[in-house]
Amino acid sequence: ILNVEQSPQSLHVQEGDSTNFTCSFPSSNFYALHWYRWETAKSPEALFVMTLNGDEKKKGRISATLNTKEGYSYLYIKGSQPEDSATYLCASAGGTSYGKLTFGQGTILTVHP
Amino acid sequence: DAGITQSPRHKVTETGTPVTLRCHQTENHRYMYWYRQDPGHGLRLIHYSYGVKDTDKGEVSDGYSVSRSKTEDFLLTLESATSSQTSVYFCAIRTGTGKSYEQYFGPGTRLTVT
């Protein structure tokens, strides 16, 4: 079982602030790293899938980077808005073809107006 | 929503009773997964399926069994529900090929075991 850790556990920012959080994962046998956004009372929604060292992905104000050699990924949100409030999950895919994901415990982001 | 539905959406049951949760998909995806969500744990994989009648255990499979007799349905059964199985259960399917696949989640089933 892969051990995926996320930090911080929770984060409170003001509207307009930029913020970032970290996902750490075992670098050996790396296959892919997933980021999900999870709003309360909804189901997780895929943000990014990253597979190559140095990958950078961007969707609107949200971007992510990947370092597979040292086993971490950063998620950045530029100019946070209240609607960005959610739990952000990362998940590591082991080196199999079954697509199994091991999730971190998530970072809960609250953006205050 | 990748055509995923879960039923029931909410259920309250008593300790010791059997419970079956259903995940239904309409897009013929091969891979399906059952997760449970618990505070402080994110999502944890219970069981998964890689084809009809092909299933395997995840990291928290004790007390759960699954069946997949047709592509569109993946059933999760709690043979004898316990209070520790109170949780929100999510089904997911996998789309895409190679390394760049994604998982799409159903709306969830909230199960309370009293």
Image: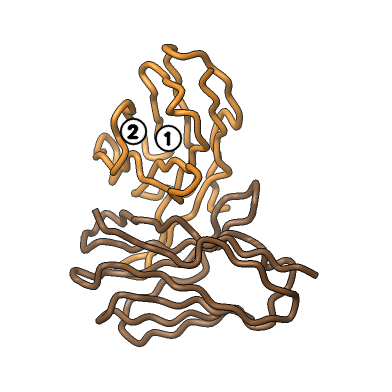
Chain colours: A brown, B orange
What residue sits right under mark 1 in the picture? B73
- Subunit of mark 1? B
Give the alpha-carbon distance from disc 2 to disc 1, as whole Å: 6 Å
- Nearest the viewer among B108 and B44 is B44
The secondary element bearing badge 1 is classed as strand
Residue B40, how many percent across, how many down? 47, 49
Question: Going by the image, does B63 lie left or right of B20?
Answer: left
Image point (33%, 63%), residue name: A92
Question: Residue B53, relative to residue A29: is it above or below?
Answer: above
The answer to whether tags 2 and 1 share a subunit is: yes
Q: Earlier in the sequence, mark 2 or mark 1?
A: 2
The amino acid at mark 1 is Asp
Image point (35%, 70%), residue name: A24
What residue sits right under mark 2 in the picture? B68
Q: Quadrant of the C terminus of chain A?
A: bottom right
Residues at discs 2 and 1 in contact (Cβ within 8 Å):
yes
In this view, the residue farthest toward the right is: A113
Tell me if mark 1 has few (under 14), some (14-19) or many (20+) residues whose alpha carbon lies within 10 angstroms of its own: many
Residue B25, how many percent across, how many down? 48, 43
- Nearest the viewer among A95 and A86 is A86
Question: Going by the image, does A33 lie left or right of A76?
Answer: left
Q: Hey, which quadrant is residue A2 in on the image?
A: bottom left
Residue A52, how many percent across, how many down? 31, 81
- Nearest the viewer among B68 and B105 is B105
Residue A74, how many percent across, how many down? 45, 78
Question: Residue A61, relative to residue B17: is it above or below?
Answer: below
